[in-house]
Image: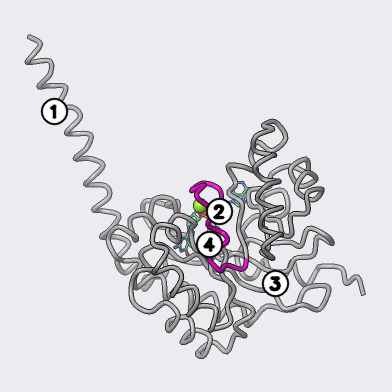
């Protein structure tokens, strides 16, 4: 009896597993060629300077609108692209598209040119010559290097320090800025900041989420800001959904802020409209 139950139990789990594997394989198939079919596009989430709340840059975020399955979240398809190696062709396309697009945006109300921040997945880091790809993109698009930022995840950079050091060195020579994304989640972070030459850290939204309620998160966030500033590194906070979070970060000197409370990710046309509508303080 027990044996039978165990068996059917196994069959149940194994069928559920088959299902998940099948779905993943299906999505992987669909993801191949999705760019060419025009199902993938970029949206841009504004990033603001905390001090004067000026919009000074954006983060490029990929969206997949499948004709039958609908919107598929990046948390799902980026992972598939990463595991399958598809990211190796997709990553450079995203980089190109973001650089070309950024050239079309008007300046902000203070007359400053926006930067565009592009996410780079761990596999992209390890494959080939990222610095050469970046240079190629800047050359083809004509975008000034200072207007391109790359977001690398903390864990990817920390996991291979030797590779990271030489890669970061090469990236710096191209003139782009490098930020560590999801900072704080790997937590090896604080001490490693001294060894990895980055321009900025993005405090993960999981810390920001509970800032008003959790004294530990507030303490850690304050420590990250203080440490980063001691090293001359810019601090960005992401996932700000309430004014209270903004106020706390502002008080502690967080340089840049991003989140639904300030602005949602926008398509390029809406971003341009927002910039055109912005009051000019000068
Ligand atoms: P990420 O780089 O940490 O991007 C920030 C995510 O937080 C985005 O989710 C953004 O829409 C979301 N977000 C922004 N403000 C708020 C807020 O106030 N509250 C909450 N709850 N969320 C907020 P999204 O667009 O779903 O992207 C998820 C992840 O997928 C990104 O995390 C990034 O790691 C990855 N990703 C997205 N586009 C690309 C891409 O082009 N290339 C690569 N390699 N990864 C990408
Ligand atoms: Mg990011
Ligand atoms: Mg992040
Ligand atoms: Mg993330």
SS for tag 4?
A: strand
Mark before the other along the chain sequence, 3 or 1: 1
Q: Which residue is mark 4?
A: 61
Q: Quadrant of residue 230?
A: bottom right
Disc 2 element: helix
Quadrant in which the C terminus appears: bottom right
Q: Is residue 187 magenta?
A: yes
Q: Secondary structure at mark 3?
A: helix
Image height check: is 181 above or below 187?
Answer: below
Q: Earlier in the sequence, mark 3 or mark 4?
A: 4
Examine the structure image and report whether residue 71 is included in the region drawn in magenta: no
What residue sits right under mark 2 in the picture?
Answer: 191
Label 3 lies in ligand 1 vicinity (Cβ under 8 Å): no
Q: Residue at x 39, y 69 (%)?
A: 163
Q: What percent of the width, then of the height, locates residue 59?
A: 59, 64
Where does label 1 land, which residue? 11
Q: Nearer the viewer, mark 3 or mark 4?
A: 4
**Residue 195, x across and y down, in percent:** 53, 64
**Residue bearing mark 3:** 272
Q: CB at mark 4 closer than 8 A to ligand 1?
A: yes
CB contact under 8 Å: marks 4 and 1: no
Q: In the image shown, does 129 or 116 lie closer to the viewer?
A: 129
Query: Which stretch appears magenta?
Result: 184-199
Q: Which callout, 2 or 3, points at the residue further toward the start of the chain?
A: 2
Label 3 vs label 4: CA separation? 16 Å
State the residue in front, 248 or 243. 248
Instruction: State whether label 1 is within 8 Å of ligand 1.
Output: no
């Amino acid at each position: 009896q027990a044996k039978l139950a165990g068996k059917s139990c196994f069959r149940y789990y194994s069928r559920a597993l088959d299902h998940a594997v099948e779905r993943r394989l299906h999505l992987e198939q669909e993801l191949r060629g999705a760019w060419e079919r025009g199902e993938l596009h970029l949206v841009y989430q504004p990033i603001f300077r905390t001090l004067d709340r000026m919009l000074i840059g954006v983060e490029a975020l990929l969206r997949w609108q499948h004709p039958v399955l609908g919107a598929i979240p990046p948390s799902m398809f980026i992972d598939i692209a990463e595991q399958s190696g598809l990211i190796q062709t997709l990553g450079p396309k995203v980089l190109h598209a973001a650089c070309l697009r950024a050239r079309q945006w008007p300046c902000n109300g203070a007359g400053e040119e926006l930067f565009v921040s592009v996410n780079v997945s761990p596999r992209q880091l390890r494959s080939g010559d990222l610095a050469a790809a970046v240079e190629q993109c800047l050359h083809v698009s004509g975008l000034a290097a200072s207007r391109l930022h790359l977001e690398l995840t903390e864990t990817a950079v920390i996991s291979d320090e030797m590779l990271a050091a030489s890669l970061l060195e090469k990236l710096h020579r191209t003139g782009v800025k490098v930020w560590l994304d999801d900072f704080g989640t790997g937590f090896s972070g604080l001490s490693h900041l001294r060894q990895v030459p980055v321009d900025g850290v993005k405090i993960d939204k999981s810390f920001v989420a509970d800032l008003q309620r959790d004294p530990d998160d507030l303490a850690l966030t304050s420590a990250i800001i203080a440490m980063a500033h001691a090293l001359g590194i810019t601090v960005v906070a992401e996932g700000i959904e309430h004014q209270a979070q903004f106020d706390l970060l502002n008080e502690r000197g967080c340089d840049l802020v991003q989140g639904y409370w300030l602005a949602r990710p926008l398509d390029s046309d809406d971003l341009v409209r927002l910039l055109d509508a912005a009051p000019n303080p000068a």
